[in-house]
Amino acid sequence: MESIVITEVALRDGLQNQAVTVATPDKLQLIRLLAQAGVTSLEATSFVSPKAVPQMADAAELVPQVLSALPDLRMSVLVPNAKGLERAHAAGAQEIAVVLSATETMNRKNINMSLAQATDVSEQTLQAARARGLRTRAYVAVAFDCPFEGAVPLDVVAALSRRMLDAGAQEIVIADTIGSASPGQVKQRLGTLTQCVPAQQLAVHFHDTRAMGVANAWAALEAGIRRFDASVGGIGGCPFAPGAAGNVATEDLVLMAGQSGFRCGIDINGLLDAIAFAEQLLQRRLGGRAITWLQRQRDKGVAALAA
Ligand code: HMG
Ligand code: MG
């Protein structure tokens, strides 16, 4: 059986857009539940301006707590600039992710930089992170459509991906920020992108605005991608990208991959426990497209996936 790696992003992408403030001990408890479910790779927070994203203001407190509670977890944190890298490094983070959008307007709205500035800053941040021995990811956001500028040219996405790889990114995360991609497009774009970035270094980050997240993940699998971002319960959305829904739900992705012959080491019932806890924190119902069926299987004592 082939393996895939899922990076859980509920703590960062999921929480950054929530109206309810989640306390640091509750974030740690959610991370513990995810680790108990078998999650081994997780983006825990972002070192961004607390004025821009108040929910992430406790990043410097959370990171050392996660490191001490779960030393074996591969934890990444998002940093938009040199100050973010300094803060992340001081907190002990060993992996960072920069965020570069493929259009002028999305960079301005998200990190208050032009495309050229954002490209330079992301390159410098990756180089500085590598010089400190940190692991690195680079998001290429709005890699399909931009909420402000519409369709994004594939050659721009390819050129930015290549520049981030050359600057030291060990993983390039192709992000469908507003969830507008279709499986046909995913197949076509990744077919081109795997020619300029090795497939092992490409990850995909789908938002599920139009219920195509799982289909898009399948198209990516078929294109040779084995690294996926997902958010438990489908929590998520970028506060600076209007119309974006949550990420593809981790439980949906685990179900699809498992039933299609790919192992990821994550237990669905463990994810259901994490979802129940997140529901208490956010005071609303959560869950991806398969949640009702998954809960029913659990209640009947029937495994959703063969062991
Ligand atoms: P700015 O206002 O242009 O920054 O914001 P500045 O350099 O002029 O500084 C303004 C203030 O922010 C100063 O503080 C700085 O010290 C401080 P003041 O003097 O006013 O007290 N500052 C910082 N504080 C903490 N951490 C930092 C930092 N940098 C500066 N790193 C900035 C620029 C990038 C900071 C701001 O725009 C920002 O924080 N934006 C947040 C972006 C964000 O979190 N977006 C969501 C994540 S991206 C996403 O969701 C997409 C993704 O999921 C993929 C996808 O789906 O496409 C990854
Ligand atoms: Mg996102």
Image: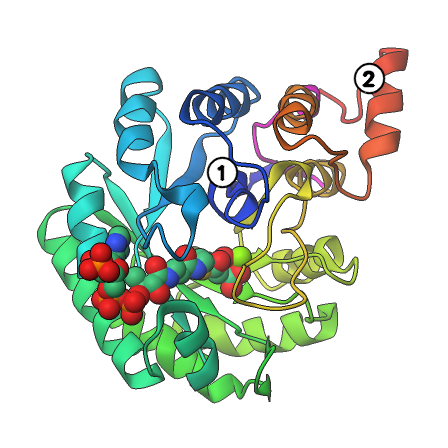
Label 1 element class: helix
Label 1 to label 2: alpha-carbon separation: 25 Å
The location of residue 306, given as percent across then percent down, is 76, 23
| Residue occupying the point 30% across, 75% down | 118
Tell me which amino acid carries mark 2. Answer: Arg
Residue at 69% over, 71% down: 180
First-in-chain label (1 vs 2): 1
| Res 144 quadrant in image | bottom right
From which residue to which does the magenta span run? 261-269
Q: Toward the viewer: 178 or 219? A: 178
User: Residue 83 at x, y = what percent?
Assistant: 18, 56
On the rendered structure, is 131 left or right of 269?
left
* Rendered residue at 37%/54% (across/down): 51
Residue in the foreground of this view, choosing between 273 and 19:
19
The mark total stands at: 2
Q: Which residue is mark 1?
A: 11
Give yes or no for residue 266 being in the magenta stretch: yes
Question: Is residue 103 visible to the viewer in this orientation of the structure?
Answer: no
Residue 170 lies, with reference to residue 300, above or below; the image says below
Q: Which label sits in the foreground, 1 or 2?
A: 1
On-image quarter of the N terminus = top right
